[in-house]
Image: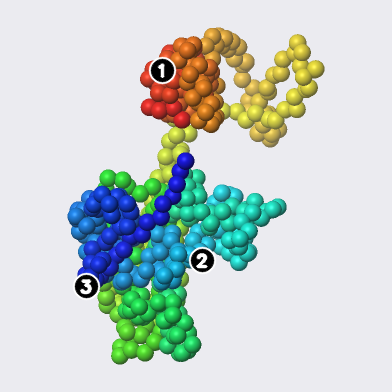
Amino acid sequence: MHEVVPCSVRIGSRNSKRFSTPRCECPAARYENERPCKHLIWLLDKISKQALFDHDPDSELNLTESGYPAELGDPFQRISEMRLDVLADSLHCDIAAPNCDTAPPNYGRVREAREMVAAVAGVRPRELDSYRPDLETSYNSASLIRRGDLEATLFSLILASHSLAAWVRTGLLDPSDPPVDPFRSLQRRVCRIIAELDAYSASLRDPALAVARREKGKEAEGPRNVKWAAEQIQNCVKQIEKSVSRRTRSPLAAWERSSAARALVAILKAIVNHHIDSHAGNTADDRNLYMRLVGNQHDFGGVYIAALTTLVDQSQFIEELEGIMDLLGRYGAPTSFAANMRDLITRMRSHTHAVGGSSTSTAAGRRESSDSMLGARSSTPSLDLPGPSQMKGKQVEFVPAQPEPSQQPRPEPPAPPAPAPAPTTNPRPARFLTPEVPASMSRRASGRGRRAGRGAGGGAGRAGGTAGGTSAGAEGSGSGSGAGSKRSVSGNGQDRGRGSKRAR
């Protein structure tokens, strides 16, 4: 039996009498005096990955006796600066009112669940925003099964079960899928921050909205003004810059570089389109998000240019950057930032031409090498082959296509017929994927393997995976045969050594 025992982690300020250091209420911490417990380390590690914006992702963290990294500083202060509900979006959590054990699904989780269903359904990323918008409005926790609508049922189950959502997120989706793309998550956080700024500005003009925000605790951690929004957006850009430029041990894949560039372009476009006075202030930097980040000389421009400079190979965003440059010329921008952006676009365009030329020459070199090794190629026309009954005792001859009458070459003496190739004695066996079976079947197969000394698997298994049939074995003979034990040690035949350490 598996039982889920809920426990709470309390993170208070340094002035708190009971929770000045993070504390977990699990039995191991309360009765066995385990400090820090595994729950505390797990949670603070998750928070650190979202709140540490100036840390090299490949370097190690120094764990304190209280269970959080020393680089994080005061956990309570970090969470307050980021705002609890904004952090909850990145942690896939819901926000509950004080003294309440239940909470409706956070909007970030609702959007993520819809994107998960879209990824499972094979929806393309560019069609993601328009996919099934009715799912977000039709969710009912009292009726999870939607008969006749499998996608809505999966959507409801993901929202109702955090365990199912975590399983889909980590075990079913590819790292490049939008719901789990880390750079897209940072882009979403910037959109959320700008939306919080707009809501704060609206509450200053409407007393009813201000009262509603205070009841929800929106103002408990401080105002969500231009200063706060600018700091959080700059932190997101720093996280992208660190992930792109400092990952020496694990360089970014091609899809990660594309996603990082897309996020940077979208963030800059969102800032430029927010060239308005959000609220009152002494200077333009206090009132206007664009002026605070881009319009006046600040640190944001240097960090942004440094991040995008490492992605000059992503030339598919040149047109969007040129559109942003038109707006920069209209609104005004520091001379150095505008010059660096123009130079960056020029380098992107030069990289496109360089890559295109090298690709063409490389492809031509491959063709020349292939033709010299295999001889000139002739096109083969499509043939209407006779049926099986007409094929008995007959041979089908493939005749090369004849050139046009105007292009008929001079007749050449016929070449002597080439000798027929020798028949292949040991053809390469076909390779099949081994299907996964329930654990009970694997145990029964392993038992039979131990008694009989040889497993029943006859397939070749997966490349780099299991070698054998249903369960990979300790010994085997023939092509792709395996024993019935759980661990793959050795094997005879053509699948020897291709097995993984443990059979799936």
Q: Earlier in the sequence, mark 1 or mark 3?
A: 3
State the SS at label 1: loop
User: Tag 3: Cα neighbours inside 10 Å, few (<14), some, or many (≥20)?
Assistant: few
Place of residue 241 in the rendered image (x, y in percent of width and height, measured from the top left):
31, 60
Place of residue 104 in the rendered image (x, y in percent of width and height, measured from the top left):
51, 66
- Pointer 1 with pointer 3, Cβ within 8 A: no
Residue where numbered disc 2 is placed: 104
Q: Earlier in the sequence, mark 2 or mark 1?
A: 2
State the SS at label 3: loop
Residue 380 sits in quarter: top right
Say above or below: 51 vs 400: below
User: Tag 1: Cα neighbours inside 10 Å, few (<14), some, or many (≥20)?
Assistant: some
Residue where numbered disc 3 is placed: 15
Three-letter residue code for mark 2: Pro
Place of residue 339 in the rendered image (x, y in percent of width and height, measured from the top left):
31, 71
Residue 196 visible here:
yes
Say above or below: 128 vs 434: below
Q: Left or right: where does residue 118 sit relative to residue 488?
A: right
What number is the disc on residue 474? 1
